Amino acid sequence: MAAHSGFSFSRIIDVLGTGRAARQDGSASVSLIVIVDSGASHELACWVRDALVAERTSAAVHVMALPAGLSDAGAICDASIVLVGDNKSGCTQCALRYAHRGVPVALLAMSSLDMPSLPSEELAALVSPLVAQTRPKLESLLSRWLIDATDKPIAFAASFPFLRKPLAHSLVMRCAVENATIGAVDIIHGPDLPLMMANQAKLAFEVSSSYGKDISFDSIADTAAVIAVAYGSRGMWRAVSAAVPSTMSWVVRALLAFLNTQALGLFLIAHCDDRIDQLTERLHDLPYLSGPVKKEAEILADLKLVPGDEKPRYVSY
């Protein structure tokens, strides 16, 4: 049984395999069709245009006016968005043609009064109405819809930045819940840690890929840090769970596993957002900023300036 309680070589191979799968998910091609009714809000159309600027060549966004979009409705794509205008029946017909072919489709408008009514509840289940009065609200609704409705959320996030943080938080929550379940069950004492670490390593690769970062030494280093933190916190988990009544130990194990995974996930998101590097730079500047007050001559010397002129000049070596 001891062989099963450690992080074995085969499990390391499995973790690296999840990294390769995450890279493939992030580099997958995605296609999005946007149908714009002539009477749709110009402001809303501009918000959609700005949000759907792809950062990768593997993403394609096709924009069509409603008449052309109606004739081409049902074209192969990963998702379709219809900007509703005055021609509500045409927007509905266009949306349903895509929906009947299994393409996720959203009707987008600035007011619920502008949203067309669908003929039946069965058809309404195939189409997602999205109402947004502001750009942040639009990006929030679009990101949640694309994450839930499509089978390529990582690829979409890698191409469209506004999806990255919502998807990353969704991935972190999923992993935290899975690890909390593993920690709560703990039927066989020991194998829970390798399972949790495998989930966290997979999370590190998926978050990195969703931010459009290729699997490199940095992402492998992040994964190694995840494993190191998991090993380091194992003793704390055991000590805390042993200090509480046995009837409540499963609650403590689940809570600690959930919080530990959440903390690691937030660190990964901050790292991908480059906030860790910014914090490091600020901390690096603290000794200089908090040092003793310097005289004017010392400050000028540090800045390589020569006093005397009306405008100080730089000195070259």
Image (tube, helix red, strand yellow):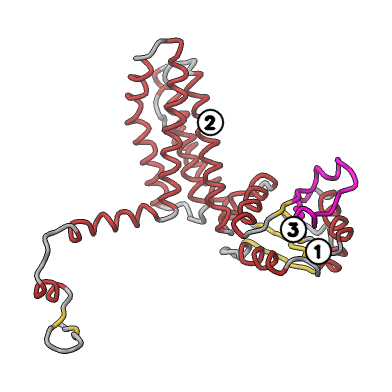
Helix, strand or loop at disc 1? Answer: loop
Magenta residue check for 114: yes
Under mark 3, the amino acid is Ala
Q: Where residue 112 sits in the image (x, y, percent)?
A: 76, 53
Nearer to us of marks 1 and 2 is 1
Residue that appears at 52% across and 35% down = 175
- At label 3, counting other C-alpha atoms closer than 10 Å, the crowd grade (few under 14, some 14-19, many 20 or more) is many
Q: Is residue 141 above or below residue 262?
A: below
Where disc 3 sits, the SS reads strand
Labels 2 and 3: the sequence-earlier one: 3
Q: Hey, what amino acid is under mark 1?
A: Gly
- Taking the view exactly as shown, the residue that stands out farthest to the bottom is 309
Residue under the point 69% across and 59% down: 31
Marks 1 and 2, the one that precedes in the sequence? 1
**Is 146 contained in the magenta span?**
no
Residue located beneath label 2 in the image: 177
Question: Where 270 falls versus 307 (above or below)?
Answer: above
